[in-house]
Image (spheres, rainbow, N blue to C red):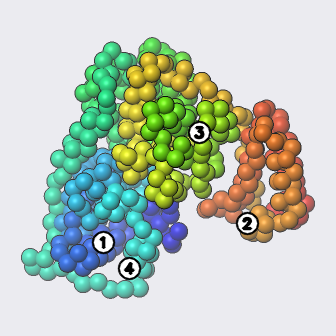
């Protein structure tokens, strides 16, 4: 990871850690870089979520792009996966999404996508950072070389049409609840479900610039759970601020996580002979219950580091077709290059209709194991993680758990913290083993 850009873009509090000057410079560099690289005027597509500062960053990016001679195509309020899709199918040099995903409204972020709709490569991002830090100079466009903006709401409509085309079934008479988190999906999701015939019930669809993700969406699923039960709905889907993730609620009000989704759709693919390599891709944070359920139906799995970036890298390398995270970032590589919350909900509807089962019936085989996760602040993450006695304590726990649970000890990517997590049959067992390992870390003098 670079100085400014992490695994999910340049993110921070608007005009504090991430400023409009940063956005101008990012636009300046990308407009020049892709123009020089291709030997013609660069074309860049931009989308944003509903937070107040997204408008400021949109104009700042456009200013930088045009000053460097690029044309900026503005999709306005739209989802991250829609920008990825349009960047890929409409022959753009790159795409930019302005969003801080599930973060509160005062944060924002700038995500960079290449012309294939994938997260931009590290080499190009490091060049962007060098320009931000004043380590290089680039020319400014003049006269007819100056760029322009193009209203590109047509791109969003193309994406909506693409989503509708993904469904093999009519949703007629199905009562579906959607929590759009006062975010990017608010102008898209209902139209898609209505077009497919569903009786669509929507909550949190009145964005005002400061209520995105506030007590709503996939980070506050309890509201949709209650809404589904009170209104007798067949299923509910909740998105985050930029709609690249989706969590579900079954007809009984139970939470259906990304792990459940991987099981449900992975099995559906296997049953139809579509599960290439007989594998699903998970991260190390997927619940032990998912692995037990996959084992029972004979499906293999790969485990990656936490982050949809790493899931997608695995899928590109291996050809695996479905992967994702517990949080609801699910990637269907045949149809998308990034997690897509609305697409995920359509795929869940497809399985329900094809198998003529309720969501609760589809999810039943995945029995979630209790989990205890504790963070410990340490002087040095590598020293604590690599300590022979700490490793021995972890190995002892793993041996004692056997096939009834698991232990995971990993470093935080952003804090001086070691995370100790145990999944087992009871909370008491989890607590016991987590504390056992933390005690060794403390005894060896690693705590701050």
Asked if the residue at tag 3 contacts the one at tag 2, i.e. Cβ–Cβ closer than 8 Å, the answer is no
Residue 259, quarter of the rendered image: top right
Separation of marks 4 and 3 at Cα, in angstroms: 47 Å
For disc 4, the marked residue is 131
Ranked by sequence position, the earlier of labels 4 and 3 is 4
Q: Which mark is residue 381?
A: 2
Callout 3: helix, strand or loop? loop
Furthest toward the left, the residue is: 144
Asked if the residue at tag 3 contacts the one at tag 4, i.e. Cβ–Cβ closer than 8 Å, the answer is no
Separation of marks 1 and 2 at Cα, in angstroms: 36 Å
Q: Which mark is residue 364?
A: none
Residue 377, quarter of the rendered image: bottom right
Q: How many marks?
A: 4
Q: Position of residue 374 (x, y in %)?
A: 74, 48
Q: Position of residue 177 (x, y in %)?
A: 40, 24
Ranked by sequence position, the earlier of labels 2 and 3 is 3
Point 28% across, 56% down: residue: 88
Q: Position of residue 339 (x, y in %)?
A: 43, 47
Can the viewer see residue 382?
A: yes
Point 83% across, 35% down: residue: 428
Q: Which mark is residue 30?
A: 1
């Amino acid at each position: 990871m670079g100085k400014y850009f992490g695994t999910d873009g340049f993110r921070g509090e608007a005009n504090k850690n991430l400023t409009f000057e940063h956005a101008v410079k990012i636009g300046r560099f990308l407009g020049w870089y892709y123009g020089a690289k291709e030997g013609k005027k660069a074309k860049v597509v931009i989308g944003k979520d509903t937070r107040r500062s997204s408008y400021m960053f949109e104009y700042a990016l456009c200013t930088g792009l045009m000053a460097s001679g690029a044309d900026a195509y503005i999709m306005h309020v739209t989802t991250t996966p829609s920008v990825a899709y349009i960047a890929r199918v409409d022959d753009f040099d790159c795409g930019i999404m302005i969003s801080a995903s599930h973060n509160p409204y005062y944060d924002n972020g700038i995500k960079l996508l290449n012309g294939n709709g994938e997260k931009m490569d590290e080499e190009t991002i490091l060049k962007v950072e060098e320009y931000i830090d004043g380590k290089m100079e680039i020319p400014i466009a003049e006269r007819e070389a100056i760029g322009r903006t193009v209203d590109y709401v047509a791109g969003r409509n193309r994406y909506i049409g693409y989503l509708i085309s993904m469904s093999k079934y009519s949703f007629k008479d199905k009562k579906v609840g959607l929590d759009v988190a006062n975010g990017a999906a608010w102008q898209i999701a209902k139209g898609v479900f209505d077009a497919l015939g569903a009786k669509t019930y929507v909550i949190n669809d009145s964005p005002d610039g400061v209520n995105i993700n506030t007590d709503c969406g996939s980070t506050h699923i309890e509201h949709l759970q209650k809404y589904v039960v009170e209104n007798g709905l067949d299923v509910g889907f909740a998105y985050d601020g930029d709609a690249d993730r989706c969590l579900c609620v079954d007809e009984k009000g139970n939470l259906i996580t990304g792990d459940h989704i991987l099981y449900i759709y992975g099995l559906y693919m296997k049953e139809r002979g579509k599960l290439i390599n007989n594998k699903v891709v998970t991260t190390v944070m997927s619940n032990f219950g998912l692995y037990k359920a996959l084992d029972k139906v004979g499906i293999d799995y790969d485990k990656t580091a936490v982050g949809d970036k790493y899931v997608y890298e695995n899928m590109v390398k291996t050809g695996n077709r479905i992967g994702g995270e517990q949080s609801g970032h699910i990637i269907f590589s045949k149809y998308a290059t990034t997690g897509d919350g609305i697409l995920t909900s359509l795929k869940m509807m497809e399985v329900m209709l094809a198998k003529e089962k309720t969501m609760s019936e589809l999810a039943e085989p995945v029995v979630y194991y209790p989990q205890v996760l504790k963070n410990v602040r340490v002087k040095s993450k590598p020293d604590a993680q690599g300590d022979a006695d700490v490793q021995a304590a972890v190995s002892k726990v793993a041996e004692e758990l056997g096939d009834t649970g698991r232990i995971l000890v990993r470093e935080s990517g952003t804090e001086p913290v070691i995370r100790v997590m145990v999944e087992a049959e009871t909370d008491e067992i989890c607590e016991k083993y987590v504390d056992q390992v933390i005690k060794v870390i403390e005894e060896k003098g690693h705590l701050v």
